[in-house]
Amino acid sequence: MGTERTVAVGIGAEELATADMTLNIGPQHPSTHGVLRLRLTLDGERISRAEPIIGYMHRGAEKLFEVRDYRQIIVLANRHDWLSAFSSELGVVVAVERMLGMEIPERAVWARTLLAELNRVLNHLMFLGSYPLEIGAITPVFYAFRERETLQRVMEEASGGRMHYMFNRVGGLKEDLPAGWLDRARAAVREVRSRMSDIEWIIRGNEIFRARTRGVGVLSPEAVLQYGVSGPVARAAGVDFDLRRDEPYLAYGELFGPGRPGRVVRRTEGDCYARFECLLDQVYVSLDLADACLDRLADLPPGPINVRLPKVLKAPEGHTYAWTENPLGINGYFLVSRGEKTPYRMKLRSASYNNIQVLSELLPGNLVADMIAILGSMFFVVGDIDK
Amino acid sequence: MTTSLLAAPPATPLAAGEAPTLEAFGLDPWWLILAKAVLIFVFLMLMVLFEIWFERRFMARMQNRLGPNRVGPLGLLQPIADGLKLPLKEDLVPRGVDRPVFILAPALATMPAFLAFAIIPFGPTVSVFGHQTPLQLADLPVAVLFVLAMSSLGVYGIVLGGWASASPYSLLGGLRSSAQVISYEIGMGLSFVAVFLFAGSLSTSEIVASQERIWYAVVLFPSFVIYAITMVGEVNRIPFDLPEGEGELVGGFHTEYSSLKFGMFMLAEYVNMTTVSALAVTLFLGGWRAPWPISLVDGANAGWWPVLWFMIKLLLTISFFIWLRATLPRVRYDQLMKLGWKVLIPGALAWIMVVATIRVLRNEGISTQQVFFAVAIVLGIYIVASYLWDAVRGNRRDAEEQEATAAERAGAGDSTGGDPMAGGYPVPPLDAPHYHGRNSTSKEVNRA
Amino acid sequence: MDGYFGSYLVVALLAGLGVAVVGGAFTAGRLLRAQRPTPEKLITYECGVDPVGEGWAQSYVRYYVFAYLYVVFAVDAVFLFPWATVFAAPGYGAVTLVEMFVFLGIIAVGLLYAWKKGVLTWV
């Protein structure tokens, strides 16, 4: 690799022969937050080829699904993307419920929507803190974690978990929300909304941040479609697609639409700055959605929050595909059952895996310094790539 | 004023509390010189320890946290604990490094950082055991030039350390650093010229003496701004901390360093920060002279008091560094070089010309008002000209871009109609232009 | 310790002290710390994988051009310093100013040339 001879344009009109430099970014590298590895071929400080090498964190999740029953799968499913645990377990139970043709109680639907949106805020806050950190601004991450802490406290009170909630069950939620929790959750949402401006002001309008991210790593809508990129990264490139609006699940059908709180945040530039802005604005949308869910939950009459299940839960023979708009993009669950208590096959389509593939397209031609800006703005979780 | 202490040798026409000039140096007995030299080392070491603690606590307050608060009162002993722990770590020298250079580099980075402090005046002449002596180790006729020379020497440590490590990260980090530091050093040197124009000397003690009436930061504000930017670039701190930009090049030039050698680089960084801050205080912020309302008090600039003013100013300048670090992201390398070469250096050159012209005109007896009038006209012409220039260039660039996109569209047009069965088997519908060799980087095109 | 070189002697003394401190620190560190090298520890760090190729790869020639530019401008600045110190003294006036304008003009042409050539544009 290192001895590859190429011709590069040197100073002036003369052409000088130089050997390219191979640089490994990862698997142990501060900017890949996880064990993603990139093999870069450098021409001076410009990247001429980039190859993401994945699999350092492969845990065989899909194979393990096949030898676990439907209750146990949830615990595995919320681990591959540790920042969106609630949303990931949601996808599994939605798939199984669809298979069973199960109708779930209304309270469970709204509570799930609420928790999924809070989880989205948690996830986005993480990246809103870590992305500036990668570009060298160290303060926003502390603000982001203060907000995360506020929200995690209510999530923990409801579910008992701070990261891997394990709160979803086939047919609803594990248990009802604690008494008085709705008010505390509402206060937390209000608090986070009022303090979001701290993060916004310190980083959004910063000249250096703009200079680092504007027009850098521009992702075209064509590339988004070719590579199956989804989520905020795709919407920042102008692809107007959000499952919450376009193929509503849970209670999203009632939340999106004219005059309702749900909006699809979109940018057209496709650069790092647009991706960051998308994420930031989505936080506000999610907080609005959470408020709407809280209002609705307060109005709902008391009732069950789950469905009593048989001792042995068997999905009928057949197959189904459920997909959800996870914080990082579309997560798809293809479930094939032969009527056993374990699935015959459960294919997981994770958002980060597809989003990261486009790097080999996006990175060449950019500076090494831009590599950091681009990598950070692709918003991925390595566990979600490797599964 | 203790003018009665005029018991010095006849060669010193100095009273305690008076501003020393170049002639006041070189009269100290040997033990006083040695004591001062040792004191400079002790002062700088203590300053570094304090700065580390101060930076962590101060930044923590800005970030809703407490910072170190376990070791000693208010965590004050934390840097000492860290400083003891670091050298006791195992020192790894990787195989394949250039060993002598690898070991020499951290020493080469640290030493000049200490040396530069020799010419910083801490205060006026004071009495030490009956000897009248300025609170400054040495003053040279070219004192400021000496600081620049020392900071250039420090670059050797960085670039050699990067090179000797035999690692791509270190190599790139070291090269970047050297290019950055030398670029910003030019801007820094040029920002001094206006100060020399006013002070008529390169000696730090005389520059401080000439700021008795007003600080140069006020009179020569553009110079001060240029210096403030270049000093941050010179000591590799955020937003210009690219040599060790932890995201891109892991640890930059010190990726391979560990234990004491790593500590030396850190030490050099903090000492350098102290030095450029002290230089900012000396050249632009009135040195050890008391700030304005206090300076009216009789005796505020005499005896040992000035050391206090100097320390306050120094700490405020250092706080500025910390504030920057807590606020700003890192600039990109090409942006940094662009700022240095295309903004700071031409700006500094133009400012020198303006200052010199104004001074000559005033010497020739032309009033300041007329000068301002002329400057306003010149500026007006410049702004109009640059606006026109931009407008013309902008149009041309737009036209070029349009042409380019048109060509791209023409190139892309034929690729979409490709036969999906061309390779003998069905190809998935990946029909973006780059799959067919178009729109690729210029690099690939050049590959022969 | 007086005379023109006296001050430099003082600086040299400080340098000697510095060498002693750094040398002492290195020696003390060597005596005090643990030293158990294993082959794995001595591998150059490359993000957790074995290093590919040689560390000393060829790099961009552009750094070299900046070094040249530095030499040119550092010399420029050094000429400016003495000029600035005597500038306001009696006997120097408009003629000195014009002379320096000519000098700076030549330097500026150099910078403009480098600018135009695209040397100052990084990559």
Image (tube, coloured by chain):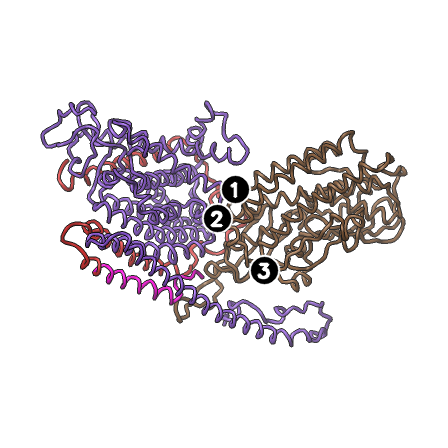
Chain colours: A brown, B purple, C red
Pointer 2 and pointer 1 on the same chain: no
Q: Which residue is mark 1?
A: A138
Q: Which residue is mark 2?
A: B330
Between the C-alphas of marks 2 and 1, the distance is 10 Å
Left or right position of B198 against A195: left
Tell me if residue C121 is in the magenta stretch: yes
* Residue type at numbered disc 2: Arg
Look at 39% across and 63% down and name the residue there.
Answer: C119
Quarter of the view holding residue B314: top left
Front one among B93 and B18: B18
Left or right position of B118 against B102: left
Secondary element at image label 1: loop
Q: Is residue A155 visible?
A: no
Relative height, residue B428 to residue A33 (above, below): below
Q: Main secondary structure of the magenta part?
A: helix
Residue at mark 2: chain: B
Left or right position of A194 against B39: right
Q: Is residue B354 visible?
A: yes
Q: Which residue is mark 3?
A: A218
Relative height, residue C107 to residue A163 (above, below): below
